[in-house]
Amino acid sequence: MKKKIDPLPLREFLKTKNDANDFIYLLEKLSADLFKKNGKSFDKLLSQDLSYEVGKTLKSVAEGTGESMRNKQHVELFFSHLKDITSSLPVIHVIVAVEPTEKVVSLIHNWIYNNFKKLMLLDITYDPELIGGCVVSFNGKANDYSLKSQMSMMRNQDVL
Amino acid sequence: MIQIDSVLIDYLFIFGALSLLGAFAFFIYSILKKERDLQEKEEKTLSQYRNIIKNAHRQARILLEKTSDASANIVHDTKNTNEEVVEELDHVLQTISEKHIQHLKETTELFEKEYREKLENIHKLMDTKGSKMIETTQEDFAKTLQGYTNDLLKQTTSSQEAIDKKIKELFEEAEQEVAEYKKMRLSKIEELVTRLLRNTYKEVLHQSMPESIQKELIVKSLEKAKEEGMFDI
């Protein structure tokens, strides 16, 4: 690759760890389709096998590499690099007190992007006992910022 | 010569045979004779035995008859004698019993007389002693009762004091236990109420908290995590 792949444009559909796993599976499928008999070209693969948004974003990322995607070897290499980048993205584990709807996931994901300008994946789970707030664990560190934890602290200080 | 010899031998043989036959016949005759003599002797002895036995039987019969007569006489005499003896014995016994009855009667009368006298004496004595004894007993009883009452009073007083003391101790102990129990129960109730309140406001908060506030809390948590360097690599 002439230039490094910048995964930031992928952030719209790479928000959670599950998204990343699905994306890796998709890349593997595209690589396999590429070398089939009467295999499709890169453009056809993107336009026919992927959604418009994903196809458009992948095309933009591929263009950013400066390589021609007419060459199937280049396309395969692109997919392979992209797969490696995706699987090595940092994962933040977050436990929230509400069900992790798309809005909640987007909220956290956007906050992370706005604050660090990096693509990070979320591994979100749900625990209503937390009442509000969340528990964050990243890179071997974990801390509880939930209302439950705060109430517990207050109870220990005889405030509650 | 030879012929003469053989005739002689024959004669000699016949003579010998006849001699032997004669000897044998004599022998048989002598045996039979001895046996006949023996039999005659036995028969004689047997007839003598028979005579002796016959005599013995006759004498025995005579003796038996005499004895029987004598026995009958004795029995008759004895019966008469017995009747006489019984009559005499009855008479003697009657006399003895009459004498005994008389003696018993006299003795009983005497005993009764003495007994009555003694009884009267005892009665008199008992009357005198009884009055004295009753007086003494009443005095003793009154004294004992007084002593017992005094002891009882003393003991009651000391017991009352001990009981009061014990009651006071028990009361204090009970008061302390009640206070501790009250404290413990209050603490448990307080804990229960706190837990109930906590659970209630947890539930209420969780259910009634609007989405906007939940989001705000999440963002605040993330900001705090950032401040604390949670996302530093």
Image: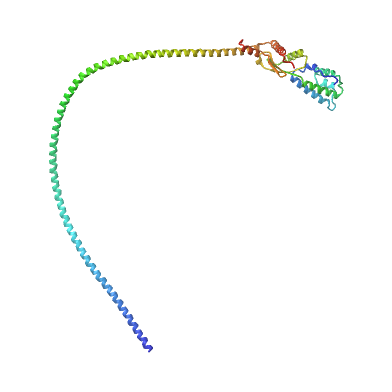
Render colour scheme:
rainbow
The N terminus of chain A appears in which quarter of the rendering? top right
Quarter holding residue A154: top right
Residue found 82% across the figure and 20% down from its top: A46
Q: Residue at x 49, y 13 (%)?
A: B176
Quadrant location, the C terminus of chain A: top right
In the orientation shown, which residue stands out farthest toward the bottom?
A: B1
Q: Foreground residue, A13 or A147?
A: A147
Q: Is residue B229 left or right of residue A57?
A: left
Q: Nearer the viewer, residue B142 or A90?
A: B142
Looking at the image, how many numbered discs can be counted on the residues?
0
Q: Quadrant of residue A120?
A: top right
Residue A37 against residue A10 in the figure, above or below:
below
Return the x and y of residue B219 as percentages of the image width and height: 71, 12
Rendered location of residue A74, percent (x, y): 85, 23
Q: Is residue A7 above or below residue B8?
A: above
Left or right for B66, reference A60: left
Position in image of residue B29 (x %, y %): 28, 75
Counting from the top left corner in percent of width and height, residue B135 is at 24, 16
Name the residue nearer the viewer: A19 or B134.
Answer: B134
Q: Is residue A17 left or right of residue B174?
A: right
